[in-house]
Image (cartoon, helix red, strand yellow):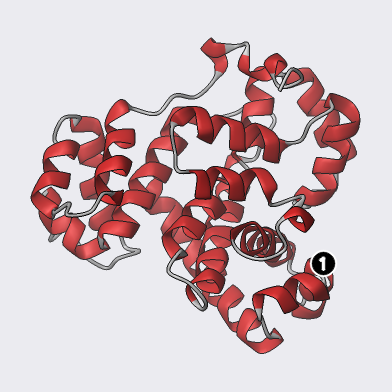
Amino acid sequence: MSDLNRVFGQATRLPHLPEVVLELDRVTRSDGSDMRQIADVIAKDQVVAAKALRLANSAFYGSKGSVGTIEHAIRVLGISDFRVLVLASCAMSAVGTVRGVDMTNHWMHSAIAGQVAAAITARGSSEGSSAFAAGLLHSLGVLVMHLTLPDEAQQVRDRSVAMDLPARAAVEKEVLGFDHAQVGGELLRRWGLPATITEAVQQYIARDAAPRGLPSAVYCGSVSASGALRGDGIESVLEGIGGETLGSLGVEQKWLADQLKRSADQAGALVSAIS
């Protein structure tokens, strides 16, 4: 991790999560947790509590301002989505605005990637919420690079194809010796998030090391999101993902086309909810 010390040696520039978010993650993943216990955790931080209520009252969930308590918010969102969306909202606030990055496009890309990854994973396992979280946060390392190494990150951006994160990762390796997936995974590890999420983020570019499961689902979500934002056809998206990855995930063209359209249509409302 010596190369990454260039990033993580600059603690004042790194985003930090509120401690209550990490406690929320621990509580919601433990056996026997209930809504009252989760609500008590959130109530320790009024800013986070306000975010949780805003999420539940957002247009994305169609609640129209009817949710007035944290327990009601948990019922509306479900425990898994509640955990992931509060995490994403707090991560977005922790990062803020990053010079040299189109933040709207960045989070739209993340929202589409998270939804697609979750939908793929939900077809074959119970890890949909982990895939959602990993997809939402998979490009967090890009933002961290711009915060901690702005000059080098700008060089990478100038030499990269817009919205093509795997191609950007290759340029990052050349310029910096590491890529945004490594940076993002390490940040999530330091935040104390579960290994399933941190490893999915860290491995999604080098998914050949784990050709099945969450890293491949996140890669598929990321490439799909890039294609959607560029206006590519589904054939181009599928070519970008690759037949081996699609086969390992059991993804068919029509299903992905339908899911990608649905995710792209919902992305704006999701970003508005978590911002």
Q: Position of residue 223 (x, y in %)?
A: 72, 61
Q: Quadrant of residue 48?
A: top left
Q: Is residue 158 visible?
A: no
For the point 91% across and 32% down, which residue is it?
Answer: 174
User: How many marks do you count on the picture?
Assistant: 1
Residue at the spot 83% in from the left edge and 25% down from the top edge = 176
The spot of residue 194 in percent (x, y) is 45, 43
User: What amino acid type should be assigned to the residue bearing mark 1?
Assistant: Gly
Tag 1 residue: 240
Q: Is residue 138 left or right of residue 238?
A: left
Residue closer to the observer: 8 or 106 = 8
Residue 182 percent location from the top left of the image: 69, 36
Residue closest to the eye, 130 or 63? 130
x 81%, y 79%: residue:
235
The residue closer to the viewer here, 128 or 221, is 128
Quadrant in the picture for the N terminus: top right
Residue 83 location (% of width, % of height): 32, 50
Q: Is residue 79 left or right of residue 170?
A: left
**Residue 234, quarter of the rendered image:** bottom right
Find the residue positioned furthest to the bottom: 254
Query: Relative to residue 173, is residue 13 depicted above or below?
Result: above
Residue at point 74% right, 62% down?
230
- The quarter of the rendered structure image containing the C terminus is top left
Mark 1 neighbour density, 10 Å: few (under 14) some (14–19) many (20 or more): some
Whether residue 275 is situated above or below residue 60 in the rendered picture: above
Q: Determine whether, in the image, residue 203 is placed left or right of residue 196.
A: right
Q: Secondary structure at mark 1?
A: helix
